[in-house]
Image (cartoon, rainbow, N blue to C red):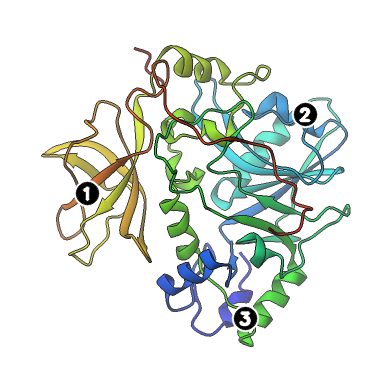
Amino acid sequence: MSAVFGRVPGAVVDDEGLRHVGNPLSEQRALAAGAALAPLGDRRVLAVSGEDRLSWLDSLASQALTGLAPGESSELLILDPHGHVEHAASVLDDGETTWLIADAGDADALLAWLVRMRFRLRVAPRDAGGEHAVVGGTAAAIGGISPASPAGVPLVWHDPWPGVAAGGHGYAAAEPHPGADRDWVEAIVTRAEEERIADAAAAGTLALAGLAAADALRIAAWRPRWSAEADERALPHEVDWLRTAVHLSKGCYRGQETVAKVHNLGHPPRRLVALQLDGSGSVLPEPGAAVRVGDDAVGTVTSVALHYEEGPIALALVRRSTPVDAGLAVDTADGPVAAAQEVVVPPDAGATASVPRLPRIGRRRAAQPPAGASVE
């Protein structure tokens, strides 16, 4: 992670990147309003060049990518043979190279796996993190910087969440979905542009928000991330990831049989819930904290934040059988705190699910101006 943002007044930087610049709640507000940018040091950029890159990735991943046009945004998952999520990445192609934005903690493993899967195809995956960084914000905020464009197409990824992409399926029944108004864009920038952004922030001419602010907005939108919601047994169905990262009718790929079986014949064994936490105390639970019904542990917290409007919130994975009206409690260092659950993935998700969905979306062009599964 580049340390360039350590010179910004008030900056708190850790191994992942810029954590905050003094006031995470105000930073959330500014980030949501398009008045700040978030340097995303917890992301890393990979690049795949070669004539076969899109068809090759299509054959490996959960998403249909063969027809991905230059400037379009997508998302992929790499699953194990049993359908568990092993890797995840945001996807953007510029006509010459496919660019992947991966969680920094997964990038090395994802790259190593891609290199092993090259065979004789004309593809060349590589680490592009030394040359490029990632900055996030609204489309308007990103419009104020200069994304990299090595092939003439600006490398700007528009998050499709929470729309339902072609071939996808949404389980969440909330209307409107809490992420319906989410405006989130991630730009791949050169290291020189990253330095320019840091200089402007240090001079007070550009406002920054930290990773804490970006994550709080993500959690409020029920948006899953590999580094948080994807443990070793996660299925995409459990966190509503079929919306944006899975094409249910594309060709074969590893894990496809489980994806189809759970969706068409069964139910995922766990389900994602959003938690509104009792804010009377001062201690938030840690990721991994137990979620309980009485004394019975029924799940674990995956992400937690103090939101500028909603207060203490979290995402958690709980047993599918956990009643939707159950009173929950979450372990903290100061003892359990009450948690009201909001259903993200309903207990009947899969074969018997019938929930309203957001309109299907097309991939957005980055070149446009800112504007072990159980079967029952």
- Identify the element where label 1 is drawn: strand
- Horizontal side of 215 relative to 133 (left or right) equals left
Query: Could you tell me which quadrant the C terminus lies in?
Result: top left
Kindly identify which numbered label has been placed on residue 66: 2
The residue sitting at 79% across, 60% down in the picture is 148
Image: 22 above or below 67: below
- Identify the element where label 3 is drawn: helix
User: Within 10 angstroms of label 2, few (less than 14), some, or many (20 or more) residues?
Assistant: some
| Residue 130 visible to an observer of this rendering | no
Kindly identify which numbered label has been placed on residue 201: 3
Kindly identify which numbered label has been placed on residue 339: 1
- Horizontal side of 294 relative to 91 (left or right) equals left
The residue sitting at 38% across, 14% down in the picture is 375
Coordinates of residue 302 in the picture (x, y in percent): 37, 46
- Marks 3 and 1 sit apart, C-alpha to C-alpha, by 38 Å
- Marks 1 and 2 sit apart, C-alpha to C-alpha, by 43 Å
Query: Could you tell me which quadrant the N terminus lies in?
Result: bottom right
- Horizontal side of 101 relative to 164 (left or right) equals right
Coordinates of residue 291 in the picture (x, y in percent): 23, 43
The residue sitting at 49% across, 20% down in the picture is 82
Picture quadrant where residue 89 is located: top right
